[in-house]
Image (cartoon, coloured by chain):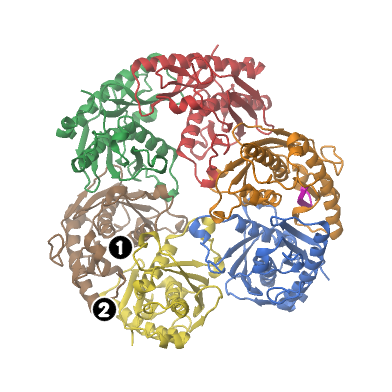
Chain colours: A orange, B red, C green, D blue, E brown, F yellow
Amino acid sequence: MRPDGREPLQLRPIHIETNYVKHPEGSVLISVGDTKVICSASLEDRVPHFLRGEGKGWITAEYSMLPRATEQRNIRESSKGKISGRTMEIQRLIGRALRAVVDLEAMGEKTLWVDCDVIQADGGTRTASITGAFVAMVLAFDKVNQQAKFSSFPVKQFLAATSVGISKEDNVILDLNYIEDSSAMVDMNVVMTGNGEFVELQGTGEEATFTHNQLLEMLDAAKTGIQSLIQHQKDALGDIANRIQLGDE
Amino acid sequence: MRPDGREPLQLRPIHIETNYVKHPEGSVLISVGDTKVICSASLEDRVPHFLRGEGKGWITAEYSMLPRATEQRNIRESSKGKISGRTMEIQRLIGRALRAVVDLEAMGEKTLWVDCDVIQADGGTRTASITGAFVAMVLAFDKVNQQAKFSSFPVKQFLAATSVGISKEDNVILDLNYIEDSSAMVDMNVVMTGNGEFVELQGTGEEATFTHNQLLEMLDAAKTGIQSLIQHQKDALGDIANRIQLGDE
Amino acid sequence: MRPDGREPLQLRPIHIETNYVKHPEGSVLISVGDTKVICSASLEDRVPHFLRGEGKGWITAEYSMLPRATEQRNIRESSKGKISGRTMEIQRLIGRALRAVVDLEAMGEKTLWVDCDVIQADGGTRTASITGAFVAMVLAFDKVNQQAKFSSFPVKQFLAATSVGISKEDNVILDLNYIEDSSAMVDMNVVMTGNGEFVELQGTGEEATFTHNQLLEMLDAAKTGIQSLIQHQKDALGDIANRIQLGDE
Amino acid sequence: MRPDGREPLQLRPIHIETNYVKHPEGSVLISVGDTKVICSASLEDRVPHFLRGEGKGWITAEYSMLPRATEQRNIRESSKGKISGRTMEIQRLIGRALRAVVDLEAMGEKTLWVDCDVIQADGGTRTASITGAFVAMVLAFDKVNQQAKFSSFPVKQFLAATSVGISKEDNVILDLNYIEDSSAMVDMNVVMTGNGEFVELQGTGEEATFTHNQLLEMLDAAKTGIQSLIQHQKDALGDIANRIQLGDE
Amino acid sequence: MRPDGREPLQLRPIHIETNYVKHPEGSVLISVGDTKVICSASLEDRVPHFLRGEGKGWITAEYSMLPRATEQRNIRESSKGKISGRTMEIQRLIGRALRAVVDLEAMGEKTLWVDCDVIQADGGTRTASITGAFVAMVLAFDKVNQQAKFSSFPVKQFLAATSVGISKEDNVILDLNYIEDSSAMVDMNVVMTGNGEFVELQGTGEEATFTHNQLLEMLDAAKTGIQSLIQHQKDALGDIANRIQLGDE
Amino acid sequence: MRPDGREPLQLRPIHIETNYVKHPEGSVLISVGDTKVICSASLEDRVPHFLRGEGKGWITAEYSMLPRATEQRNIRESSKGKISGRTMEIQRLIGRALRAVVDLEAMGEKTLWVDCDVIQADGGTRTASITGAFVAMVLAFDKVNQQAKFSSFPVKQFLAATSVGISKEDNVILDLNYIEDSSAMVDMNVVMTGNGEFVELQGTGEEATFTHNQLLEMLDAAKTGIQSLIQHQKDALGDIANRIQLGDE
């Protein structure tokens, strides 16, 4: 039995509230259990220096937590004057994951800024950020598409992420909350597309190791979880999901 | 007529949702029109270096905006590696205002960290932060008071803040939204207590000046607005407002 | 009786030495009692990014203290690698105050850099900086005006600043020195023009509050002080004050 | 055929020169093809703040490249004043990987600092760093063990790392050099122990995705490569490898 | 003939005004021609970490220029967030030079902070800083000595500094002003004691070289200049110079 | 007798391995006793801002030490986020020294970046860096010259550097190792050309002073050492030394 009474392969309750803030082109408030993240997608009409004149777009992500999103208050990274390694890892991961399902040529020379701000944390903030950021991105592209049609809609596939792990009792578990995450032997973040391919896979033994069979079992659990998350994304997007004809049908 | 149809001395709609996030001792989501701020109050069992052994507490505030709280996306201060002058001014103001109505001796050697994170901005973010932070602070003190009684409840007075100004049409207006703020001749932030005394008063001619009579007229408008804001605070606090016997009755 | 024997509404002795350093277009050494500030005004033939092509000028101020301007040596902000909130507040205030009495269009696309460096501090460094910076600015504009006439002289009004407060004995006092400032209940900085209008007003209860009547009494005191300071500015400017026909006559 | 003529599953030539620099407790110069890294292991008699009094040790890694380790000169991170996200990711990975095969209790309250400085880069610098750092670590523990016996030798398993990927021609390849890495569809870093378990697995589609079968094929390739790398480590360690009775026999 | 009409081996006019600011234990305003530096000496009752418990003192210097000390306004190092290489070189030089003539044991566990702030620059700011800082240091030690006698007066020798160089016309010249400094082939700073020994010697060919004979000629010029500077120091110190029995008689 | 058995005026063994790393245009590994430095020279086809359009080149140097180049591990400057005063002094010295023997006009609008990375330190790292950097620079210019002839070969003179000092036993000694350097009374770095002229001379009494005669004796020792170092440079350069007809014959 898990600390919050879930089955080993059961996700926490998911809610995705679209257009949560008014200024960004796309935004959501995603809740995965007690983990809550505001994801905003902002389109800017230029690309970073290294892409100028290439005729393609770019996607970049930033991630942050409010100081008291966690049990103990954290010092702001703006006060420290620098961004932690953990933050950098996460924001690089989010950006890379989104770029994998986007046709950057179809974007034209635009940059999509994705901001994931965790307002309440209970484990799995990076995977919730990816799952929410995908929806915010689709909303932003859809909004801009209505004003000035893209050559084709830039998003090629659905995309979601979850965590799997091996608990200290040696069970494979899905969607770890903070307590589980702190004590797990192995922790793996999996990012997959709507057609069941991998985009990113990061498995780490925490002062521990894992076997080939345990790996396969964790990947199966992740796949089930991600299919369910993508269904929630489709529900949240409603007509937009149908209209844009994503390639996973 | 004002851009959003209000009367000159009419506040925007106010909502204060208490206990908005689960980890902090006290928290609110305050909305003043389209301006929305998450205010969290965290109590820590130690004081800054300069107060050690003095037997009194300290209150410090931090303020930030999500990058896309505004019409144009702002670069994060953590990415820039430093905090802007504007942010510093605001967080110093919030901390100073709260300290003016708190009995620091009654707190004991504790620090109250107040975090004001603007998730949507439409003018008046600093005054909304003060008004919301006061409620979060009372909630935090109340929660701690239930576990380990303070010698006396540390909050002495209600406290709220609003802005007043002189519009480009030369009218005194209350609670400026972003459009009004951008074009006002004079902008004044007023922080007052429940018994009608001033805590802070910051009036600035924006490449303009103002007369003694205009000052008096603005102060009257501010007073009316603040009385209304304090009523909203009392409603949000419910029984806690009654129980703690604030000194303004 | 005040610590240095002054009457409640008496200013400290004022001296303004013009052209104190040779390189800047305008400079003064201003002494207000034992507070001494070197104010330099430098004109640069370009404007910040946000004003390019607008056909108007800009004024920006920087403020600093020598490490041993104070009783205890302070660590340099260059050594700390960042500017304190207090410094930012002060330099923003100085710049804003000067801009309120200058016709930025008449300046053309130039930036005036005002540097206020406190070499000895005894309270009131920010208001002494404004009073001195005004004179340095007029000297700089006059010097440039002799070489290449402005369309009209850019300075519209005299401008000076002083502090008022409520002492711990509950008296309204003018021009607080360091000892008074440290113990005052209320501290207010007032910036006014030669024709008696307000430019900036910053009143703060230091863990205290103040009433409407106390506010009015403090404003009266400030007004008297500022009239006297402006007379010192005129004396220091000599013929330049007459020639430039400021709008306060 | 690969750019340098290798078979798809062939490693580049490996050389490990032990005790390459004189001051560190352990050091190697590892060459994997043209990638050359100096790995130093330094033991310090204290642990970070969060571990004081816990009776266990800590391992932390730092990674850097000489500015001209690469085809184009890179700006030093010390000149930029901050460490890039890529550097942070790599040094966190190296530290985590080493900690997975060390008995931190057996270390006592010591910190092992591992410095990986790339003097020439041709792809695979992070996996070469892990493979070399493991040897430097064993040398350092062995040296200290000779002076003051550990309760048991702290290293539990051999550990090495390599990269695998899917080339743009859709082949699974082992140990990618820089040219291959730049054009690969998928890039995966694998860290394994001497007994064939995973420590870390980081697979990334570069604007691409990969299937379950491709994943299995890449893991097979990685396993073969790592067994060969561990044989090179044993050869480099000589008697030390035998004497310390690592748990993989 | 030199730009300002001096003979090749003639110093500029020297003025040393003692006790220029009121808070520091010792201070001077030194003028060497148009170069003007405020030198302050502050004594603190503790030593840096690396000297604790050693029973000896430390001397450390900081150097800065007001932004408009120069013909073109310089950006403040506090705004840049870091100290330039030039500033670091100079402040290390000043500290090292002063330490060479002080008996650090006689100081006890105290730190002398020397601040050299250039308010007007016309070449030779680092040598003027050393010459002025020496006087400020003696004043500070004398003041503290009157309150709490040192075991012996800590200053062992007089100390002054000047620059010499080879002009573009190939003449050896003494005490270069800014114009001469900018065009000189060779520039050498010399720090000497009252008994004619060298403390520091820094000679640099500016995209040029110099011979052994030129070196000897420059050293002769420097020696003459330094003797004259030390006479000015003695005049400024008055009785203090006599009373303290410096070792150069 | 010296700690390592050398005569007072005997250099340590010198080795210069050319083309030590493959990417830079020129590189060496120089060993002076146990001091080992990788020197790389990189040519870039543009010049710093202040030289654009002047038709001449620039040379700039950077210096760093691996953390465990020394007996005690040093914190990386990239981790500290800033470069120390010592590092800045050294890299400014290296750049200035190289520029003194190069015809910057002959370079055209190119920048030569010289990186000196100390992998093992035993005293004299800055002088070893200059001696090695000179060879790396000549190799880089030679390589570029073969592809696109310079108007004339930019290097005018050989250049090398060494240290001399006065030991605590009051002897003049050449090429101080770390132990000697730590205890020396006087330490002097000398940079000279192949035709025996001075480029840079930095002599420092370490809480001590030195006489004119001691200076002359140290300069003689330095001259002998530098002649020997230049012979090693010629041997390392082989034909390149002959072909390029440096001006010292």
Magenta highlight on residue C116: no
Q: Tell me: B236 left or right of E233.
A: right
Looking at the image, residue A91 sits to the left or right of residue C247; the answer is: right
Circle 1: element type: loop
What mark, if any, has residue E211 been given in the picture?
2
Label 2 is found on which chain of the structure? E
Q: CA distance from mark 2 to mark 1?
A: 30 Å
Q: Which residue is mark 1?
A: E101
Which residue is depicted at the point 54% across and 70% down? Answer: F69
Task: Give the percent coordinates (x, y) of residue E113.
Answer: 35, 52
Residue A190 forms part of the magenta stretch: yes
* Image coords of residue E234 (percent x, y): 18, 57
Of the 4 image quadrants, the one containing the N terminus of chain F is bottom left
Provide the residue span drawn in magenta: A183-193
The vertical placement of F249 against E92, above or below, is below
Residue F174, quarter of picture: bottom left
- Give x and y (percent) for residue D131: 70, 69
For residue A108, above or below residue B193: below
Neighbours of disc 1 within 10 Å: few (<14), some (14-19), many (20+):
many
